[in-house]
Image: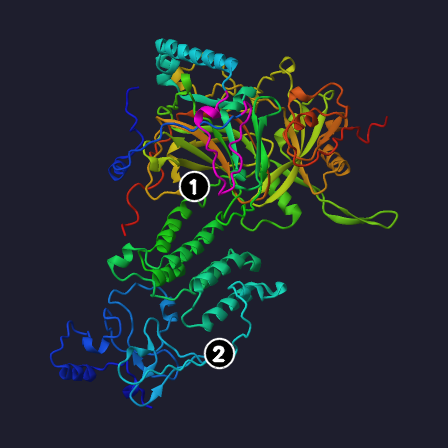
Amino acid sequence: ASAGESCQWRRTKEHRVKAQQSAGGLITTQQGQAPRELFTSVNISVVWRGNKKCAEPGCSAGFLTWMRPREASFEGDFALRWKPRCALLPSTSQLIVQHNEQQQVLRYFRCSPASAKRGPVPAQFVKEDEQKGTKSLATKEDLFEQVAKEYKTKDTFNKVIDVFTKRDIRRRGHVEFIYAALKKMSEFGVERDLSVYNKLLDVFPKEVFVPRNFIQRMFNHYPRQQECGVELLEQMENYGIMPNTETKVLLVQIFGEKSHPMRKYQRIMYWFPKFKHINPFPIPQPLPEDPVDLAHLSLTRIASDLDAKITIYQLPCTDFTESGEEIKLPHIVGIQSPSQMELLAKHNPKKPVFVEGPFPLWLRKTCVYYYVLRADPIPLEEKVEEPYDPERCFDYPLQLDLDLDRDLGDDESFDVDDLDEGPVFAMCMTSQGDQATLNQWISGLQQNNPILGKVPTLFRLDAGTQELQGAADTEPGYRHQAHPEAQREEPQPAEDPEAVVEEESRRSHGMKQ
Amino acid sequence: MSLPKISCVPASRLLSSIHDLRWLLRSVTPLSVPRRALVQSEYRRPGQPREDKPQWQMFKFDFSKGLEGIKKHFKLLRHEFSGRLVGPEGKPIIEHMLEQNRVIWEFRGPDSLQEWTLSSDREIGGQSEIYLKLGRNSDTCFLHGTLQNAPPRDGETRYSGYCTMRSKQPLASFDRKKHYDWSSFNTLHLRIRGDGRPWMINVATDTYFAHQKYDIYSYFLYTRGGPYWQDVKIPFSKFFLTNRGRIQDDQHPLWLDKINTIGFTLGDKAEGPFQLEIDFIGVCKDYAHTEDFAYEVYKRNPEV
């Protein structure tokens, strides 16, 4: 049938004129506003915009849109994605009822099928054929849980959202669905994906929750939906995801410009850029998965010296022992800077050096452990101040013997005793922190620092929280098993049982006893 | 100082909060806190009725304790009087005027740990732990513990997993509240050694209105990790205003004349052990820093 006559919602110019003439004493207020009589059962504040064609393919009906005169500025073609479809078209004799796939009568948002006063109400709601017979309570999470574990990916997540959106044009229960989806995102691995959040935001019906007058704006219009929108944005904020223009457009379409989710979006867009780059020690976004690369990254980070050089003493590999067993050799990555090498060269061979560890280092969510080669601080009486070599720098003198005092107002140092914890000579990272591996590291270090062959090396390997040992702790009999650290940890509830401290003296291979 | 207590409120706030002048000056004394306890109250299950004991029953009256208290308070009072003869805040005026650096907190003995209060999400039912002890050399403090993200299952808490260390409010004689006056400084200087975790520094000032009770000025503290000490300098103009953990829309610079406490919080959603060593916390005057405030003060979001 020709849609022109039978479509109830189409208003051509002649039709309007006819109505005016027939209505007689009816008032048509502004231009473009249809006479009131025809719209009594429908929301009166609708302003007729004009002919809009139904976007359903094959249907050439025109209809009324619900757009208000003040149109939001849409960027891109996101607005076009939401295509209005024509409502049901009751006419005088011909019943042209549009159905969707599930045999549900297509009905536009907020208008009831009984709105037209012309023709009978076609209340034909075809029951769904797939209606489940069971009466158990079905939660919105069931849709997600039905996806098998191995198929939980972004595609399946998007498919679940599509199933929900296509199921019901009114999107009944969308709030619970969105809450359930937010909870299930981490299972599907999509919690850091902005496109998924935008798709989820798309589940909200558009323009229904936008307040249309000052009373609605005042009274927290559709509070539950606004809370749900805020919750979605809060999850984005927690994962540190920056929303984009698509999010903004969706929020404006769904909630309007003066809504809580829009405010939340504005706050995110204000504060996130301010705090994005304030970390003075930034960590690269996808952390390297290779343990050697990770060790490289973390050692350069903690060395805090740009001259420091990384040496890979061993790459992870598998080795076969004599009995045919396979053992996995860990990686050993060490770092040492030239100033550390100098300090080690100046170290007194009679004093021992300590290998301490493992110390934790957190890189975002991963914790790696490093070991340190250090010595005790030199006591004051043994400190020898070497004069500066005047030939080191010819541009200016490195040492000045001026008798100037700084005024109180120019004193830039704090009145604190300087901490002297002893020099640190080198650091290393390895996956297995046992003595054999660290021995390998020391022998590798020895190639560049021959003094290590003469110096006794002690191993202080301990599980649990770690701090660098201070001078007060070293006793002359360092071979004792009873470590002062173990005694101090007892009064506090220790979270891990402490491993036995291994203290062993080690001589290099060169000096046979 | 004879300035009234209305100091820390910017003019716009005064107009809006004219109706609410209730300000609880009385602080609630903790119930029978042992002397070495640094941790705040234990977990109170929601719905559990609070103890309705009258105030006089909560104190343990002890003669020796009373004598100690009298001695301590009168000694403090005497110091205050004699300090005024020397100069403002007990220091000669030249020093007070020209001071460029001041060490506020040091950790040189077990008594210094008494100035700090520890707290973790154990109070709301979580499982994080936090402990404080002196470092190896008795020169630094060692804050360590474990962070657990699992929220308590009470139906209303959604996120969890935080640990904090907060300094106690300085007290004058007879437990009167004192404030730090850092108006001649503009930078916070810390010497720390962390394990790579990002912490948050919270500075709480003295406020007037009840709405401002949980107002805290915060900034981030990024640690590098590693065996070397890290010097952190944060100008006070970078601190932003938050209330109950939520950053506020109306920002204003931190007022330095009545600072109550400073605190460190960890809540980086990474489960596992953490540690932080602090050598000292001081304030300094950086002449090169001329910024008043790092964030915009004008109204950014138009009214609804």
Image x and y of residue A485, in percent: 68, 26
- Whether residue A8 sits left or right of residue A452 in the image: it is left
Quarter of the image where one finds residue A489: top right
Is residue B293 visible to us here?
Answer: no
Residue A419's x, y, as percent?
A: 57, 22
Q: Could you tell me residue A191's position as x and y percent?
A: 52, 56
* Amino acid type assigned to the residue bearing label 1 in the image: Gly
Occupied quadrant, residue A262: bottom left
Q: Residue at x 23, y 71 (%)?
A: A44
Residue A95 in view: yes
Q: Residues within 10 Å of mark 1 (few under 14, many from 20)?
A: few
Single out the mark in the foreground, 1 or 2: 2
| Quadrant for the C terminus of chain A in the image | top right
For badge 2, the amino acid type reads Glu
Provide the residue designation for mark 1.
B245
Q: Which residues are magenta?
A: B34-60
Left or right, A61 with respect to B134, comes to left
Q: Mark 1 to mark 2: distance in Å?
A: 49 Å
Q: Is residue B58 above or below residue A25?
A: above
Dot 1 and dot 2 residues touching (CB under 8 Å)? no
Question: Do discs 1 and 2 belong to a common subunit?
Answer: no
Instruction: Find disc 2 in the rendering and name its residue.
Output: A128
Q: Was residue B51 drawn as part of the magenta stretch in this picture? A: yes
Subunit under mark 2: A
Q: Which mark is residue A458?
A: none
B242 relative position to A49: left or right: right
In percent of width and height, residue B18 lies at 25, 36
Question: Who is closer to the viewer here, B221 or A277?
Answer: B221
